[in-house]
Image: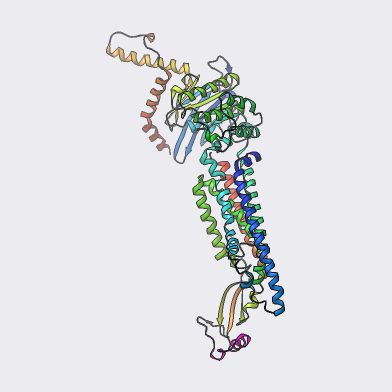
Amino acid sequence: MIWLIWRQHRGQFGIAAIGLVALSIVLVVSGLHIASVYHAALASCAQTNSCNNLGPQVFAGDGFFFDLVNLTLAVPLLVGMFWGAPLVAREVEQGTNRLVWTQTVTRTRWLFAKLGCVFGVAIIWGGLLSLIVTWWSGPENAIDYTRFTPGQFDLQGIVPLAYSLFAVSVGIAAGSLIRRTIPAVAVTVGVFVGIRLLVTDFVRQHFIPPVTKAFPVGSHLDLVRQNVWTLSAHTIVRAGHVLSHPQLPHACRGLQGTARYACISGSGLRQLITYQPGSRYWLFQGIETSIFLLCSTILVIISVHWVVRHDA
Amino acid sequence: MERKPTTETRPERQVERGATVNEPAVWTDRLGKRYGNTWALRDCTIEVPSGSVCALLGPNGAGKTTLLHLLAGLNTPSAGEMGVFGRVPGGDNSYLADIGFLAQDAPLYRRFSVADHFEMGMRLNPRYDRSRAVDRVAALNIPLDLHVGHLSGGQRSQVALSLALAKRPRLLLLDEPVAALDPLARRDFIKLLLDAVREEDLTVIMSSHLVSDLERISDYVVLLASSQVQLCGTVASILDADLESEVREIADWDRTRSTRTKTTSEYPPSSLEEVVLRHMEAAVSTRPLVQQSHRGER
């Protein structure tokens, strides 16, 4: 079986390997560059005590690499489209399922061998890429404190691996049930993107009830430095009444910096911030990973049942 | 599915080659396959003796492919039972090892070379005879290192047949193997098949919608039409039975028209093709009735 899978997919293996190596080289080289610039900037700003806003200085000219890293969000989808969806569908489409399923190999064994191979690819691609991107994002995490925010959260840690496995499972299930490659690819894109958006935008913030606290105006930055995920921020007066159009109190106009913030706080204005504390980052990574792994498992079970029980 | 012991329910029978067998290589009993609300095959009861070359005939859509897929263990029946060499067809290894299947249009992996296919057969089957397959293909001047996507239709079929034969199956199932071939390729394919049948202990069931394809080589006939079995038996017995009924029919007709009654010898025997066509016609003309009765049962 392993020989057959290798012979059948060696072209795909080659493309996947070349793609991964090329992407890794670009990210490692640019990551090393950004890290060295970052450490140099840290060293120089420490002397002048101006380390608050390093972003523009460190990341100047790196827009391409940021775009590239953001694009790796789509990598799980590519694995699902090109490895998952055709796995069963292409065999059925070309009739070769009737060839291979009448060799002396049970359909179950054939399918499990294929699943092992495609999940292996998903794990290697998803895992390695996620490792590199997490490392690459180190300076960005340290400067912008954004690793918990949607977009960054989805690129780092262990969730990309779960997304890859999920995308592949969606592809396999779609291909097994629809039995035609192109429609299966289309469904894979729709389902994967749909579920990902649903979880990112509507479900993730409710994994654990968020914290809502009133903070003095201007202290938001201290909170941000704790790597929180800010869900909402409102300006309120001391009684708790939310201002829809907060205005700077007259008395505070013309003041600058900390004096201004002190004046605003003194006038009774507060910021009501709803957020997920940064300490929950790995818990949220774990919950999100579990959700997508559970979905993958269910899809794989459905696919196996369908392929083994269903007529050729 | 629990199966009745066939030796009790199936009486001994004499097959044409003179061998007495207790159990046919293949039997089906009221076998049926339904896709949605349509019966692709219905009440199919046949027996194919061991060692025979059976022609599975019928018009397009008659259920030939369905029956072959059921026997190949690719599909599961919706009704009835079947047995192949005393086993229930299915997807288990011991069954799969005994059958060779050549699906319609001879599907092969387009990007594989001929040799790759034999390598695959070698790795996926326990008693694979690769050298024989290589010899067969070499004898046909088909280059081993050529990708099958570059082969002609006839060569593809021959490679697919060699692949199936090298598995050393006891039952070889061929689905419309020559339908897409030109006359020359058809002749070569039949020769390859007949050589294999002569050399090995092989039972063959091959389907076609053209009787002339199989008339010369088959000694047993199953005719499907309108999803049901219209004829099942040795070629000789079918021709004999037909001749008798035809003589009776014409004699009846003659009796009403003339005073003179002809004897059997005065009518030329029908060819198998004529007989089959007549039965197909009869099946098709009664089809609306058959479908109505199906609807009534549901």
Query: How many numbered discs?
Result: 0
Residue drawn at the location 55% of the way across and 59% of the way down: A195
Place residue A164 in its image quadrant: bottom right
Residue at the image position 65 percent from the left and 49 percent from the top: A120
**Residue A160, percent from left and from top:** 62, 58
Q: State the residue in front, B111 or B254.
A: B111
Indicate the quadrant where residue A128 lies: bottom right
Q: In the depicted view, which residue is nearer to us: B34 or B65?
A: B65
**Measured along the vertical axis of the image, is residue B85 above or below residue B90?**
above
Residue B257 found in image quarter: top left
Colour basis: rainbow
Coordinates of residue B121 in the picture (x, y in percent): 62, 32
Taking the image as shown, residue A147 lies to the left or right of residue A184, namely right
The residue positioned farthest toward the bottom in the image shown: A251
Residue at 56% x, 35% y: name it: B147
**Image quarter of the C terminus of chain B:** top left
Image coordinates for residue A35, horizontal then vertical, percent? 68, 66
Quadrant where the N terminus of chain B lies? top right
Q: Position of residue B151 (x, y in %)?
A: 52, 32
- Which residues make up the magenta segment? A246-267
| Residue B78 lies in the magenta stretch | no
In the image, is residue A251 part of the stretch drawn in magenta? yes
In the foreground, A133 or A99:
A133
Q: Nearer the viewer, residue A244 or B281?
A: A244
* Residue A227 in sight from this viewpoint: no
Residue A264 can be seen in this image: yes
